[in-house]
Image: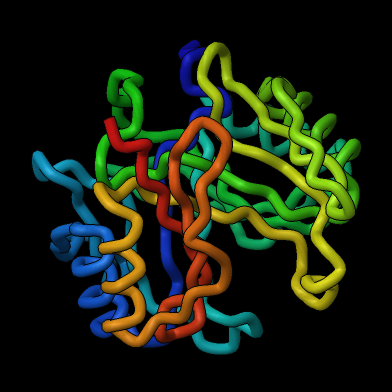
């Protein structure tokens, strides 16, 4: 059994209300190319980074889905039934039926006990070798939750994500980083009171060459800056934004040498 797959973020996906507009926006802002995915049961676009490597998907939000456009992450598991059962035993729940795509894998959208959504996926083909994120790939994951200690324990139990460094955010409490093995994947924090109406959620940061260029492209294309750009400890830069259809996302640029 491939234990290197457990807890590994392997795909990202945008459900939106205008796929053509979203495709144009992200190709410009993140620098992706895009191509339709053949054989999908419904129209599905694959975003690709340099080297023609797929990193994310784009699809129309199903009719009747009651929430705004959003990005989601797919987390790998070598044992689909064990992981989904474990999530439910710990208080998570199912948000979708199990989806089986012969050439792709088995997947299901679920939530943690506080309500943040993500997909579990067992890929049909062997996973790519692990490497540091390249430009255009997801480079940081960020959980906004209502119960930080409970969330830390849940993801540790399910994915073996280990709490690592923590940063004191003053009134906002602790920002808890977490690792998968020796790799730092992201951070978790309690939602600030300004986001009281926003449900717990996972945010995804995509790696770009220059944060200021990214900001200019977001605003030129009709997006909105929500927070930043700001320098984070270590010298990297981040910005959180909303695309023209209303999906939140973030950009991350490494410290200039």
Q: How many marks?
A: 0
Residue at 27% of width from left, 30% of height from top? 257
Q: Nearer the viewer, residue 201 or 96?
A: 201
Relative placement, left or right, of 199 versus 221 is: right
Residue 173 image position (x, y, % from top left):
87, 46
Residue at 48% of width from left, 70% of height from top? 241
Q: Is residue 241 above or below residue 61?
A: above
Residue at 72% of width from left, 56% of height from top? 116
Q: Nearer the viewer, residue 201 or 103?
A: 201
Residue at 20% of width from left, 69% of height from top? 28
Q: Is residue 179 above or below residue 40?
A: above
Which picture quadrant has residue 162?
Answer: top right
Residue 95 image position (x, y, % from top left):
68, 61
Residue 176 image position (x, y, % from top left):
75, 34
Residue 105 image position (x, y, % from top left):
39, 41
Q: Nearer the viewer, residue 21 or 84?
A: 21
Q: Nearer the viewer, residue 210 or 68?
A: 210
Relative placement, left or right, of 199 versus 218 is: right
Which picture quadrant has residue 27?
Answer: bottom left
């Amino acid at each position: 059994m491939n234990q290197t797959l457990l807890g590994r973020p392997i795909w990202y996906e945008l459900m939106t209300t205008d796929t053509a507009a979203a495709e144009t926006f992200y190709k410009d802002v993140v620098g992706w190319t895009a191509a339709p995915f053949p054989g999908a049961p419904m129209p599905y676009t694959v975003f690709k980074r340099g080297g023609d490597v797929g990193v994310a998907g784009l699809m129309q939000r199903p009719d009747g889905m009651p929430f705004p456009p959003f990005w989601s992450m797919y987390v790998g598991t070598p044992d689909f039934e064990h992981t989904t059962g474990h999530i439910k035993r710990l208080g998570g729940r199912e948000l979708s039926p199990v989806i089986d795509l012969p050439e792709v894998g088995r997947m299901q959208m679920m939530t943690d006990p506080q309500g943040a959504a993500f997909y579990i996926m067992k890929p049909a083909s062997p996973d790519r070798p692990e490497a540091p994120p390249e430009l255009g790939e997801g480079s940081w994951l960020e959980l906004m939750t209502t119960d930080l200690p409970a969330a830390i324990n849940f993801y540790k139990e399910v994915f073996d994500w280990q709490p690592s460094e923590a940063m004191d955010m003053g009134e906002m409490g602790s920002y808890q980083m977490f690792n998968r093995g020796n790799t730092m994947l992201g951070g978790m924090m309690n939602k600030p009171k300004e986001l009281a109406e926003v449900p717990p959620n996972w945010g995804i940061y995509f790696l770009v060459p220059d944060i200021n260029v990214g900001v200019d492209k977001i605003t030129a294309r009709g997006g909105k800056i929500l927070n930043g750009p700001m320098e984070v400890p270590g010298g990297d830069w981040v910005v959180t934004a909303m695309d023209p259809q209303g999906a939140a996302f973030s950009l991350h640029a490494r410290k200039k040498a």
